Image (cartoon, helix red, strand yellow):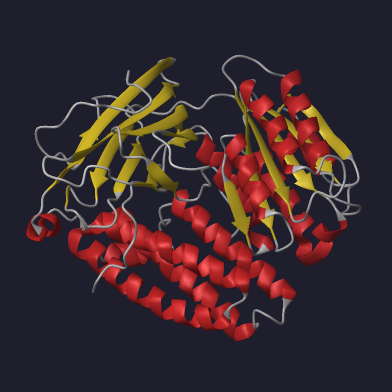
Amino acid sequence: MQLRPIYLSLVIVLTLANLGFATDLAFSTRTQQTDEGSHTEEGPQSKPSHSNSDETRNPQGEPLTLQATLGNSVYSRTTPKRLVLKVDLVAKSTKPIHRKPLNLALVFDRSGSMAKQKKFEYAIQAAKLIIENLSPEDVISLIIFGDEAVTLSPAGYAVNKEFLYHCLADFKPEGNTNLSAGMLESFAQIDSMSQEGQHKQVIVLTDGLANRGVSNPAKITGMIEQARKRGIHLSTIGCGSKFDEKLMVDMATAGSGRYTLVKEPERIPEAVANELNGFLAVVAQNVKLDVRPSRGNPITRVYGELIPGPTMKHGAGIGDMRDGESKIMLLEIKPGARERNGSLQVLVTVTYDDPESGSRKTQQVNVTARYDAAYSAVQASESRSVLLYANVLNAMEEAQAAIESLDTKLFNSLRKSFEQIYEETRAHAIVTSDQLLLNQTFLLNHFMAELWAASQNAPLHDHAEARRQLQKDVEYQRYLLGHHRKPKAGSKEHEEHKEH
């Protein structure tokens, strides 16, 4: 099958595999498992003497592995119309992970809508589950928000758990959604018991839109960024179909945390526990990627972001990376030297703070592509896996556009395209034993199933509630392409992985 034409490009996509790890904190949930260098601005100028389309840096004993792979290491005057560079970052602990004492704030929405489907009851169950598994060295504060923020239990050591359970007993869902009040109160509580060596974390759960207090997204994320400078992390959990998923993602990004969508309220407790287990396994902090193509080869597109125009460098703040997590990034680059002896060179740099040593570290890879007039040379240089990654992302973006425009004819056409891309990508991943690509094909398959079920059960143009939920599903599938979790042992996805 011919790959769909796409522009000459360099691309970076983020994926996450949540692997098991040993810590002092082990959650025994009672619910079902949830699914789930120095260069000028123009970059390096030296001409490569050969093509280096795949380069990996994995210094011994370091927690991050950086790899860059080109979709084609050779290009001609007209082919291909894009070059794809897939940059992979993989985090893996090289030593046993010793858990830091927690300074944790649980911030739960108690607005009136949380009464539906017992969402507030499940949130309280989640809080009890967390309390049950804390140690006496951990600090916890419990906060709920409706019209205003209410501190059920101020920050204190988790020594009297019966008292903490009692604090959760007397409140019912009511009022509006003053998200900013709950968030600011959580920062104040964490600051009041802040000590060196703690992991400071906020987990926010909501099912609605911020309609009281500060509701401007830029102001909310600005508050989180200020708290992050004081070492406070923040993760978000959205439940239902009426919350602002973009705000949830932006809040989690600003707080170096994660966003989780929970469609079934009974899965709230495990979603909270999974997030807590995840951030206890951080192996690299303040991770930043920097991509700089050689002079005359500007970046013209960054997938998932808007850029003002062609640029000679692009920086991406990744935040913290957890043990077993992997990330990918995609951009598009327009080559300038489509002539004899022409070449394209890209320097990729990752910087991060190593929490084990307390030092800042840097890794770099330099990949190149060269001009050749022969089409056979271009074809022979192709990396099929890289190009298929790009096709998966394009399919996701096209589907989202169809849903947002409510174009059912386009949707039906895209469904057939999805099936073709899925089968091709999955088959290639199995043949080449590419586990990461296989993980993403499962995401795509799930995504297709969600779209098809929604189109059959609730026509997109007739049911506003179904449309909202569908849009959230689409956004979350795209988010998971950037933060993919490895299928859990015992899950359907895990068993299918084992078969291959």
Give the quadrant of residue 165. Answer: top right
Depth check: 240 or 211 in front? 211
Could you say which is closer to the camera, residue 357 or residue 64? Answer: 64
Q: Is residue 484 visible?
A: no
Q: Position of residue 16 (x, y in %)?
A: 43, 47
Determine which quarter of the picture holds residue 120. bottom right
Q: Is residue 126 left or right of residue 441?
A: right
- Which quadrant would the C terminus be assigned to in this image? bottom left
For the N terminus, the image quarter is bottom left
Relative to 498, is 345 above or below? Answer: above
Measuring from the top left, give residue 399's x and y in whole percent: 50, 69
Instruction: Give me the residue at 61% from left, 35% from top.
Output: 254
| Residue 359 falls in image quadrant | top left
**On the rendered structure, is 348 left or right of 113?**
left
Q: Position of residue 388 (x, y in %)?
A: 30, 61
From the top left corner, tell me how far across and down residue 242 is, in percent.
74, 61
